[in-house]
Amino acid sequence: MTRNESGQFGRLRKRAAIFAALFFCATAVAAQDVVLRSEGGGLNISGPLIGFDGENIQIGSPNGPLTLRYDRVICEGVDCPDLATYVPELRLSGARRMADVLMPALVESFARSQQLQVTLDQIDDSHFVQTLQRAGALQPAGRFSFRTTNTDEGFADLIANETDIVMSVREVRRSEVRLGAEVGLGQLDDPRQSRIVGLDALVPVVAAAASVSAISLADLAAAYSGEITDWSKITGSSDPMTVHLGPVTNGQAQRFIDEVVRGGDRKLSIDIVRHPDNAAVADAVAGDFRALGVLPFTDVGNAQPIALRDACGFISAPRLTALKTEDYPLTAPMFLYLPKRRLPPLARDFLAWLRGPEAQLVVRRAGFVDQGAVPIPLDAQGQRFANAIAAAGNDMPLIELQRMVRVLAARVRLSTSFRFEIGSTRLDAQSRSNLLALAQAIRDDRYKDRPLMLVGFSDGRGAADANRDLSSARAEAVLRDLKALMGGSCQMAPSSRQRRLERPCRWAVMIPSGAVR
């Protein structure tokens, strides 16, 4: 654990301990506690108010959060909700990158879809409120309250019950999952407790005068761990390399460190130049031809973005389809993390609306990449085919590649892709969101009579037979999870050549029997 992680864990632990202490102060009713009684006197409990959704009240108890129907109890205490004046409120806290433009634009568009008007009140530099009002109504229909700081603070607020949703530009960390479970938030790494609202990307950047157009992930990680200190391995130049990164609390910088640098069992170099914000990183890199930085792709400023080269030699730039398919390695989903408790109906409606096409349009207009599926012609996969042909041999004969082309030639690839952890059938976070979106699209009958084909692939490491088995297992895993999401209403009909998922609503998913890598 690094010093920064240790400090963050300490802050989280302290705030969780304070919140947990509220659960266990059973000797007396604190000033902020409420008392819930039943009319017959059989129920008499007290605890801090956690939430109220207009129908159910949740309070802390010695055994964790307790949820009861509000119309079945008598509530006593200054914090008891008043149904006559109750206004649903959703509190959001976390990454400023999401809160500056994207989330307010989504709330405003959602309000319009509900025939509601929106007013914005800026409380201070890090707090603002969007109030939703129906024309002619005296009482607001709801409020969205924002606290804009960073991802770390968002999770700390959730654990301390000071927010309802975390705006995060990285995946939840194990320490946050553990503390969340301790205070009754559920399992924050459960796919059902998060949403991806859009896609961002991290890009390596250099000065416009630098003579480099691409860098491998391995070299990027080596540069940030201090293993590479000059440009000789990348450009042949002996010029020293200066490496730049955003502030310690920047969630995207944290993601880069977690997944790229430490993902290779490396430690972050102590010689990295840290900057207070992305603009400062861009300016520093743009002014030094020896510099290397990493920035969100919409914040590169005057610096020059360069492409990434993977282990197979593919060159990938952060373009629309590459981000949607996760072909670009540093695709960065933007998450909403939710507690395992009922939110007000307004909040539930908003979260459901986020999956629809109207929300995806807002994401695009805000400058990010939406998750809407787009078709990709087969001939756009030329680099992949060229690499596969070059790698063909005794264990993967050319005839197998020809068979793959025959199977896929009449079809169009959708940008909806499913990525897995190395050597496994476990989906990554973005792919879990893609699976939910695909299930919803099928339920909405967006594909009508068109069959969908799931084709499994592996990364090509190791023996061909093992990779073929892994490819099939991955396709089968997606099919199984998709069937579960569809509510078990789909029936499998085994076949010697393929497995088909039959459903009365006229769609099918197919897996070729000999999936190629």
Image (cartoon, helix red, strand yellow):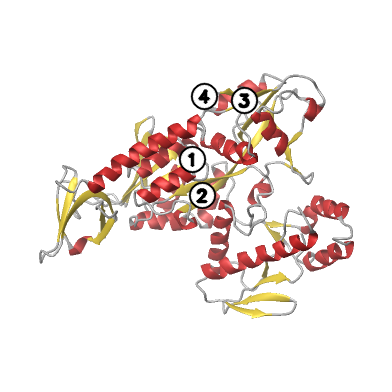
- In the image, what residue occupies the spot 49% across and 44% down? 173
Q: Amino acid at mark 3?
A: His
How packed is label 2: few (under 14 Cα within 10 Å), some, or many (20 or more)?
many
- The mark closer to the camera, 2 or 3, is 3
Q: Could you tell me which residue is drawn at 51 percent across and 49 percent down?
A: 197
Q: Earlier in the sequence, mark 1 or mark 3?
A: 1
Q: Where residue 188 appears, x then y in whole percent?
A: 44, 51
Q: Is residue 36 left or right of residue 163?
A: left
Distance from label 1 to label 2 (Cα)? 9 Å
Q: Are marks 1 and 3 in contact (CB under 8 Å)?
A: no
**Kind of residue sitting beneath label 2:** Val
Circles 1, 2 touching at the beta carbon (< 8 Å):
yes
Q: Secondary structure at mark 4?
A: loop
State the CA–CA distance, disc 1 to disc 4.
Answer: 18 Å
Q: Residue at x 63, y 53 (%)?
A: 421
Q: Are marks 2 and 3 in contact (CB under 8 Å)?
A: no
**Mark sitting earlier along the chain (1/2):** 1
Name the residue at the left extreme.
Answer: 40
Q: Which residue is mark 1?
A: 98
Q: Position of residue 176 (x, y in %)?
A: 44, 44
Residue at numbered disc 3: 244
Q: Nearer the viewer, residue 517 or 17?
A: 17
Q: Earlier in the sequence, mark 1 or mark 4?
A: 1
Q: Which residue is mark 2?
A: 197
Is label 4 in contact with label 2 (beta carbons under 8 Å)? no
Helix, strand or loop at mark 3: strand
* The C terminus, quarter of image: bottom right
**Kind of residue at badge 4:** Pro
Q: Pointer 4: residues within 10 angstroms few (<14), some, or many (20+)?
A: few
Q: Which residue is mark 4?
A: 276
